[in-house]
Image (cartoon, rainbow, N blue to C red):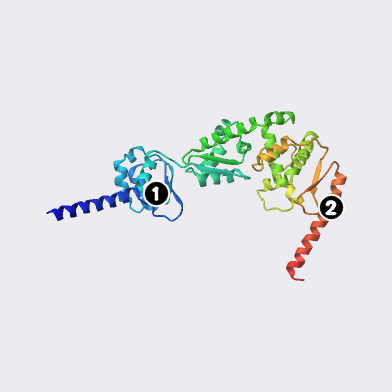
């Protein structure tokens, strides 16, 4: 009898150890460092969550997880969202994560983007909402009026940065967050005051900065580029900015702008229309926006790429000098193209 009792105790201890290991031991079944469990809005019920867990192959023993979740009242407290599951986590810890709504926010990274469609794709890719819903919002006058923008200037609320936002956040809340960050941006470093001193609104500064962003990658000459466009505006000249033609044509692969391109009918054609285009042509960096705000006072009205292909530009105050440097650059470019064609032909 004593041996039987000892055997039963031993079996009980082994069973307890196994159960304990199943509950608090490593329970994940994936090899990467982490995986995300996505619980959609309207799908936070037990059946839907368990189906997602099984289909996504998150844990080795979904059935045991379900038992644990039942005992911990997970199904009464779990909410839609994105939950990070680390490799080697226990079923107990995963259940606590869901029960305590420990969601993992999305880091929405926005660098230079050109169109509303680009932004919609980025948001649609990173959040629960669909990109079609985002575009609809960005074209809705009533929605945009609350942000003090329209369908052309809506991108001015976007300051390139990294934004931490919950995965289930709806479109209007995402844009409210962007708007708040935009207002904070303009309230710092006397940016609002600097814009007023230039006789410009923040939106106008942003639009000019978007053109400068497309014109040069050289930070030390962005101020001079900005001064050219500011001077042209003040003198009532067309901006004549090549990047706006690419935007008007929605062809960003163009390397050279020809006369035929300048005929495009678009409010973004700054050769045919005077003043600024109705909206930005990309999301400029904060560095470029500040370069516009701090643009030096110059008499420059023209600039053209240098013939040494350094990426820098030659700035001039009159068209005659500009034409001279433009021809110089054109000759150098034609020679370079001819050399490349000769090399490619094997001659």
Residue 192 percent location from the top left of the image: 68, 29
Q: How many marks?
A: 2
Residue 151 percent location from the top left of the image: 61, 37
The image shows residue 35, relative to residue 182, as above or below, that is: below
Who is closer to the viewer here, 87 or 115? 87
Q: Secondary structure at mark 1?
A: loop
User: Residue sitting at 56 percent across and 38 percent down?
Assistant: 138
- Mark 1 Cα shell of 10 Å, populated few (<14), some (14-19), many (≥20): some
Image quadrant assignment for residue 315: top right
Residue named by callout 1: 89
Tell me how far mark 1 sits from mark 2, CA to CA: 66 Å
Left or right, residue 64 beside residue 307: left
User: Residue sitting at 44 percent across and 50 percent down?
Assistant: 35
Residue positioned most to the bottom: 347
The image shows residue 29, relative to residue 132, as above or below, that is: below
User: Residue sitting at 36 percent across and 43 percent down?
Assistant: 95
Residue named by callout 2: 327
Image marks 1 and 2: residues in contact by CB distance under 8 Å: no
């Amino acid at each position: 009898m004593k041996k039987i009792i000892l055997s039963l105790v031993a079996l009980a201890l082994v069973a307890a150890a196994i159960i304990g290991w199943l509950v608090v031991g490593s329970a994940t079944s994936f090899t990467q460092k982490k995986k995300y469990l996505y619980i959609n809005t309207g799908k936070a019920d037990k059946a839907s969550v368990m189906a997602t867990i099984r289909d996504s192959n998150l844990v080795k023993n979904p059935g045991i997880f379900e038992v644990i979740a039942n005992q911990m009242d997970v199904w009464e407290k779990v909410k839609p969202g994105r939950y990070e599951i680390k490799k080697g986590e226990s079923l107990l810890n995963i259940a606590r994560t869901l029960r305590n709504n420990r969601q993992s926010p999305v880091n929405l990274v926005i660098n230079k983007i050109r169109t509303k469609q680009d932004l919609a794709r980025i948001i649609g890719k990173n959040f629960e909402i669909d990109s079609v819903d985002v575009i609809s919002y960005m074209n809705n006058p009533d929605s945009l009026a609350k942000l003090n923008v329209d369908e052309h200037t809506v991108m001015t609320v976007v300051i390139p940065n990294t934004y931490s936002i919950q995965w289930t956040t709806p479109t209007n809340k995402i844009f409210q967050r962007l708007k708040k960050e935009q207002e904070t941006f303009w309230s710092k470093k006397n940016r609002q005051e600097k814009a007023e001193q230039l006789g410009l609104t923040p939106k106008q500064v942003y639009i000019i900065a978007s053109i400068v962003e497309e014109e040069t990658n050289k930070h030390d000459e962005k101020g001079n580029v900005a001064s050219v466009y500011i001077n042209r505006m003040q003198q009532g000249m067309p901006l004549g900015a090549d990047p706006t033609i690419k935007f008007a044509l929605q062809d960003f692969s163009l390397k050279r702008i020809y006369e035929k391109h300048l005929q495009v009918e678009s409010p973004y054609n700054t050769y045919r229309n005077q003043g600024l285009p109705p909206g930005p042509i990309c999301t400029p960096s904060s560095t470029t926006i500040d370069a516009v705000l701090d643009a030096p006072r110059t008499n420059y009205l023209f600039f053209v790429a240098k013939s040494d292909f350094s990426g820098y530009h030659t700035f001039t105050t009159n068209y005659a000098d500009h034409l001279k440097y433009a021809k110089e650059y054109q000759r150098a470019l034609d020679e370079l193209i001819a050399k490349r064609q000769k090399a490619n032909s094997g001659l």
